[in-house]
Image (tube, grey):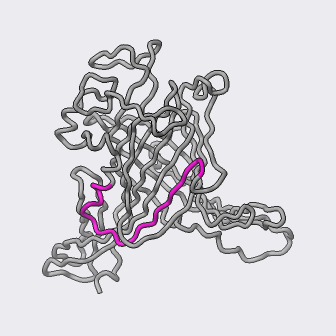
Amino acid sequence: MNDSNPKVFPNLTGDFVWSPVRPDHKVVTPPAPPAPLGPLAAFVGDWVGQGFNTIFRPDNAVTPTPLPFPITGSDNILELNLTSETLSFSPSLGTVPNRGTQPQGDIFLNGVPYLQKVNDVTTHGESVGIHFEPGIWIHVPATTVPPQGETVCRMGSIPHGTTIEAQGTFVTVNGPPKIDPADITPFKIGNPASKIKFSSQTASDPKTPRIPQDLSSFIAAGTITQAILDDPNKLLRDHISKQKITKTIAIIINTQAPPVPFGGGTDNIAFLLGQAAATAPNANAVQMTAVFWIETVEEVIHVPPFKLGQPPHLISAKASVPGQRAARFAVHPPGELNAPREITVHFTQIQYTQTVFLNFKGLTWPHVSVNTLVPAHDIVIPPTVWG
């Protein structure tokens, strides 16, 4: 099938809306309102951003990774990616019934399908796909059996051969988020305190098993520095350092407890688990944890003079970090402006930090990804902002 005009952001639900089947098909009843989405109501439309990814992956003599400066004897390689990401949400599913048994009654979920695509853009002018993930976010109401408050869950499928089910809680706070550091240093399996640092984590060393090996140009540009290797979440804090964030919804999810006592997990294909029931894994994804921050950003924008009949002004928000994708506003004043005017607007952005823990060669290797995402399309300014 040849589609000459493919959809960049596909609608995964189309005209499909989940709904319980009526017991009496002869009785026409008005449709019930969809189950609540909680914080997932903010997951609407298409989002884009430039982020950063780190992953230690196995290296071997059978299929070695060629490097400009050859390295022998290493069983791993650290890959660093400057990334360009698209995260697209389809309309919600509606009401998804889950049947309970006594004493727990039925519960009704609602879900938001998503499609995440990540490209490596580390080499200027080149774009290489490195991640493709279809999945669903679901909202789970509070239950008595098990005794669990309201939660959300992300279910995703990764083409490397892993599926995740990560459940968690959420909280709303006034002001910006508190973003803790993230550490990519590997550690002995089962002992997170026993960290083992590798030479590839030293940004100034160009002769290590790393992609890219020579980081001098990235250090000069400030895109990959020692501080960022020590803590990739620094990029998130830098992005919001000059923004005024008035409200934050934090979603904390994990494939293991906490924040939910049980449930969830990861599944891997046989190749990743390796031989003898995962005693010698090739790269077993044992756990994923992530935090998503849904932030309300207040921005003051400068609107030039405007004549009726002309197209809207397209005005970008101020970027705290040079080169980062910024939200853009379509500004159409309700009347003519003979002089410039400043107006206060609000928009939503999504930040996330995610860590997947990979087990191989007796160590657990943190695979950290971060990004700040803004609406992919122009934000239309409503007439109410003009007073």
Across and down, in percent, residue 66 comes to 35, 18
* 62 up-or-down from 185: above or below: above
Q: Looking at the image, which residue is at 58% across and 47% down?
A: 255
Residue in the foreground of this view, choosing between 321 and 274:
274
Q: Is residue 146 left or right of residue 162?
A: right
Give the left or right position of residue 156, taking residue 51 as reference: right
Between 357 and 36, the residue placed more toward the observer is 357
Q: Residue 61's spot in the image, x, y percent? A: 44, 13
Q: Is residue 335 above or below residue 217?
A: below
At 39% from the left and 36% from the top, the residue drawn is 185
Considering the image in quadrants, where does the N terminus appear?
Answer: top right
- Asked whether, in this view, residue 187 is left or right of residue 327, the answer is right
Residue at 59% in and 44% down: 164
**Boundaries of the magenta span:** 237-257
Q: How many numbered circles are shown? A: 0
**Residue 318: image location, x then y, percent:** 23, 62
